[in-house]
Image (cartoon, helix red, strand yellow):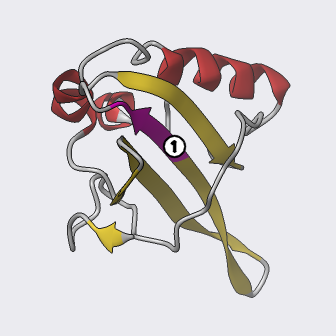
Amino acid sequence: MRPASSRPHHAGAFLAPAVLVSSLVACVGDNEGQAYGAYINRWVGKPVAQLTADWGRPSYETSERGMREFQYIFAEAISWGQRPNYITCTTKFLIDDAGIVKVAEAQGDACSTRNSGPEAGRR
């Protein structure tokens, strides 16, 4: 796995170690997690060029057996007592060899359009 950029794709975010995910996980509460799942699934079936036009360069990119994996990572420190805690969201897109997004998955406690993805910067 190699970093795609030394700069984060989202203001307030920083690059964190990649988290491998195997299924969509409800992120912040059940309703918000379901809404985020529907939000990211709108890219399934779309060309990777459209994904990167909306989301920018991924935080990490890997390739294996004809599939590319793009990971977009959001992390933010929040004050909770005397030590900072972090809320995170890792959104993963799998792209086939034809350049079409086949799978969209997310994991974390901050998976919300308020925090992650292109909609976050518009609020």
Q: Quadrant of residue 34?
A: top right
Q: Quadrant of residue 31?
A: top right
Measured along the vertical axis of the image, is residue 83 above or below residue 121?
below
Q: Magenta stretch: dominant SS?
A: strand
Q: Residue at x 60, y 25 (%)?
A: 36
Measured along the vertical axis of the image, is residue 119 above or below residue 18?
above
Q: Quadrant of the N terminus?
A: bottom left
Q: Position of residue 76 (x, y in %)?
A: 52, 63
Q: Nearest the camera: 78 or 64?
A: 64
Q: Position of residue 98 (x, y in %)?
A: 24, 24
- Whether residue 4 appears in magenta in the rendering, the answer is no
Q: Residue at x 39, y 18 (%)?
A: 43
Q: Position of residue 38 (x, y in %)?
A: 59, 14
> The magenta stretch spans which residues?
91-96
Residue 19 in view here: yes
Is residue 28 shown left or right of residue 44?
Answer: right
Q: Amino acid at mark 1?
A: Thr
Read off the residue under disc 1.
Answer: 91
Measured along the vertical axis of the image, is residue 100 above or below residue 107?
above
The number of numbered badges drawn on the structure is 1
- Whether residue 95 appears in magenta in the rendering, the answer is yes
Q: Position of residue 82 (x, y in %)?
A: 75, 87
Q: Residue at x 30, y 70 (%)?
A: 3
